[in-house]
Structures are given as C-alpha cells and as structure tokens.
Image (tube, rainbow, N blue to C red):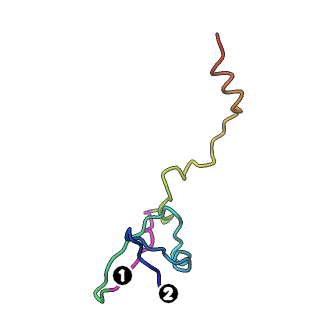
Amino acid sequence: MSTTLTSKGQVTIPKRIRDALRLLPGTAVEFSVNAGGEVVLHPPRLSKRGRGVRKDRFDAVRGRAEVPWRTDELMKLLRADD
C-alpha cells in the first residue's frame, strides 16, 4: 500500500490503516523510525483509565446541555426594556 507525499510534506493514511488503529479526524499520532530505517506509526496512547485519548477538549460535554430556552425566547428576555 502506498501514498504520495504532497508539497507540504503531508500524506494520507490509508483507510485500512486508520480503521485498524481506530484513528479519527483530529486524533494525535506518533511517528518513529526503527533500527531497520522503517517509519512506524503509533496509535494514540491509552490514558491511565484505559479509555484512550479524546478527540478534543469538548467531547466530554458535547450534547449534554439542558437549556430550557428557545433562541427567540432568550433573545426576547435579553433585549427586554425594563
């Protein structure tokens, strides 16, 4: 399996490899060169709890907001003249 290096020094990791390593967009990866001169791609390291690395800092709270206000109700409240 091969890929092409772009003028910016970027390569696309083939889907089969991304799937095998469970790599998602935004996932940090590590590269190293072994004694044989081969480049090795390392998957994300597991945290102490064994859950893996989050995609970003907002994942823990994404989709959990319980806001009873509708946008138009909130805007009416904020713009009300008292």
Kind of residue at disc 2? Met
**Whole-percent x, y for residue 42 in the image:** 41, 75
Q: In this view, does 35 lie to the left or right of 19?
A: left
Vertical position of residue 81 compared to residue 17: above or below: above
Task: Compute the Cα span from label 2 to label 1.
Answer: 14 Å
Residue located beneath label 2 in the image: 1
Residue located beneath label 1 in the image: 39
Question: What element does badge 2 sit on?
Answer: loop
Residue 44 magenta: yes
Magenta residues?
38-48
User: Which quadrant holds residue 67?
Assistant: top right
Q: Is residue 60 left or right of residue 31?
A: right
Q: Which residue is drawn at 44% across and 79% down?
A: 4
Q: Residue at x 41, y 70 (%)?
A: 10
Residue closer to the observer: 59 or 32: 32
Question: Tag 1 or tag 2, which sits nearer the N-term?
Answer: 2
Which mark is nearer the camera, 2 or 1?
A: 2
